[in-house]
Amino acid sequence: MTGLGASPANLAEVEAIVREAGTSFYRGMRVLPEDRRQAMYGVYAFCRVVDDIADGDTPYQQKLQLLAEWRARVEGLYHGVANESVTRVLLPAVQRFGLRRQDFLAVIDGMEMDAGEPIVAPDLATLDLYCERVAAAVGHLAVRAFGDSSPDADRVAHHLGRALQLTNILRDLKEDADRGRLYLPREWLTAEGVSRDPTAALQSAGLFRVCAHVAALAREHFAAAQAAMERCDSRAMKPARLMGATYAALLDRLEQRGWEHPAERVVLPTWQKLWIAARYAV
């Protein structure tokens, strides 16, 4: 047994899911103590598995069935039941850190939104609900694993989750359009005369104004998250500060690139990632 109390075999399988996803999250979580890091790997692996179901090529009804099975697994956690590697890692995390059932289920709700017909130009309320489910709910799990379950930590999750997801939406415009998706809000598309067709929207003259609105909204959430972090346990907020700084830097680069060529992929250079890690992980 190791830090969290799960078996080495289950921990290795969960860590492999995180590592193979090729995400900067893997490095960022290294700043956590062993048991909390393992809990976060369990949370990430759960999110990765249900996201893969939603984005897979299986028929919609089969996706719903697979997601329903994960709902049952989540319910099982709160009755002391775990039947595969991810839930066997999550079970001690739930018991030790008070991870909430409602947040796991909200993530699955978000995956159901993505599992059916592609989301195209949602209204602002639906976009906010989507961000709550696929990002902020993960944040509510994360802050508890980090070591702070205060109301201010939940405010960090609320705002940082939205800031990160909105940044992802701006980064992935072309990739989403290729899959028939367009997450930019309907009201702003209409106001700027931008088509709701995902491919046509990327060619619309008003796209940059819509993206500027989304970027400004993301900035508001970054600022609100930062203000809430100042009232939280500083040690527990290390990973949140690191993720916030990384995504804020990504948003900077997206804005510097502009929106005329959304297919041009924007990534942070290695030197900048290392600089952010050195500054915010200490």
Image: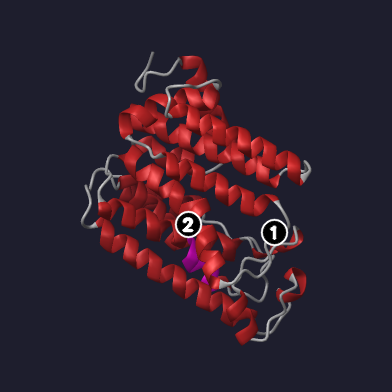
Residue visible at 47% across and 32% down? 42
Viewer can see residue 101:
yes
Which one is nearer the viewer's eye here, 16 or 266?
16
Local crowd size for mark 1, using a 10 Å CA cut-off: few (<14), some (14–19), many (≥20): some
Which one is nearer the viewer's eye here, 128 or 262?
128
Q: Quadrant of the N terminus?
A: top left
Against 190, is 147 above or below? above
Q: Which region of the structure is painted magenta? A: 250-256
Asked whether 255 falls inside the magenta stretch, the response is yes
Residue visible at 62% across and 66% down? 183
Of the image marks 1 and 2, the number of the one nearer the N terminus:
2
User: Which residue is labeled 2 in the image?
Assistant: 132
Residue 162 horizontal side relative to residue 210, left or right: left
Local crowd size for mark 2, using a 10 Å CA cut-off: few (<14), some (14–19), many (≥20): many
User: Which residue is labeled 1 in the image?
Assistant: 175
Q: Nearer the viewer, mark 1 or mark 2?
A: 2
